[in-house]
Image: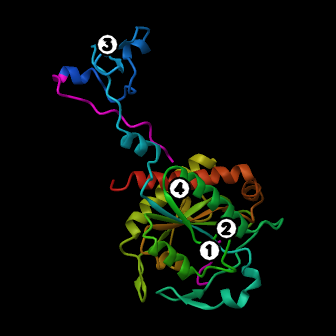
Amino acid sequence: MTAPFRLRVRGAAAGLLLCALPAAGCAAHPATTPAGTDPAARHGGSATTSAASGRPATASGAATPTAPASARASAAKPLAGKVVVLDPGHNIDNQFHTAAIGRSVDIGNGHTDCDTTGTETDAGYPEASFTLDVSRRAAALLRALGATVKLTRDHGPAYGPCVNERARIGNEAHADAAVSVHADGAGADDRGFSVILPATVHQGIADTRRITGPSRVLGTDLRDRFAHDTGTSYSDYVGHGSGLDVRGDLGGLNLSTVPKVFIECGNMRNARDAALLTDAAWRQRAARGVADGISAYLEGAGR
């Protein structure tokens, strides 16, 4: 809960087309043909072998080119070279450090608490446990795609980090994308998830002007993939049905210099949402939604 003032893996890369032949010859070897496969054989014909290369030949007798190893590696690890920061909201031990998390932190257009304890379900499942579990699961999925992933907290610290420190971790990592994972603590009748985008804040130490545009793209991709992967609906109490909210009172967004959003994965105080949030299988789907949303944004960068 964020309180105010307190994968897609692409298919295999297409093989290089050797177009020294006439145009008609190039057309005989479409990029969609798997390397080393005879189109005729796939339709009941018999494959032949190129004497020159020893590789299976196409119907015209020319050897089918094989994709370079670098291209195959790129297809298998589409996020190689990308840096992602995942920020699991709150900390299960914040409750033991109330003075420390209650100290004032400058967020540019005001001050807020260093951190908060977060919310919990009526049965006592803490938001801080939920956010860490989903973040760890999402991190594993993103690393499998080749991304370098950093968590703002994992097996420590003792409390927090403070909201300004959470932003600093993403900034110093030069993250290509950063997502803060939360669950809300709204009214019992409120349902659904939402993604929080940074407002334009240019005041004091905060300046979000360079990140609001890319953060909106990141947030939209995250919203779409999370809805698809989890089957859950947009929030019915914030965002006017869009699944997107804009806020300028969150230090984690105000102080970020990299594209960053928050996601409220559901409302812990709603019985139906709580049943999902406490289910390990659903949390894996939530992690998939987070990872797929980030992947969609990173793979579509520059669009």
Q: What are the residue bounds of the magenta stretch? A: 1-23
Seen as rendered, the residue at the extreme top is 45
| Residues at marks 4 and 3, CA–CA distance in whole angstroms | 46 Å
**Residue at 48% of width from left, 44% of height from top?**
9
Magenta segment includes 259: no
| Residues at marks 4 and 2, CA–CA distance in whole angstroms | 16 Å
Magenta segment includes 8: yes
Helix, strand or loop for the magenta stretch, by majority: loop
What amino acid type should be assigned to the residue bearing mark 2?
Asp
* Of the two numbered discs 1 and 3 in the rendering, the one whose residue sits closer to the viewer: 3
- The residue closer to the viewer here, 135 or 155, is 155
Q: From what the image shows, is residue 237 above or below residue 44?
A: below
The reply to whether the C-beta atoms of the residues labelled 4 and 1 are less than 8 Å apart is no
Query: Which numbered disc flags the more N-terminal residue, 2 or 3?
Result: 3
What amino acid type should be assigned to the residue bearing mark 4?
Arg
The reply to whether the C-beta atoms of the residues labelled 1 and 3 are less than 8 Å apart is no
Disc 2 crowd, CA 10 A, few/some/many (<14, 14-19, 20+): many
What amino acid type should be assigned to the residue bearing mark 3?
Ala
- The residue closer to the viewer here, 74 or 265, is 74
| Residues at marks 4 and 1, CA–CA distance in whole angstroms | 17 Å
Whether residue 30 is visible: yes
| Residues at marks 1 and 3, CA–CA distance in whole angstroms | 62 Å
Seen as rendered, the residue at the extreme right is 123
**Residue at 76% of width from left, 81% of height from top?**
95
Query: Which numbered disc flags the more N-terminal residue, 4 or 1?
Result: 1
Label number found at residue 223: 4
Look at mark 2 in the image and give the residue it sits on.
184
* Of the two numbered discs 4 and 3 in the rendering, the one whose residue sits closer to the viewer: 3
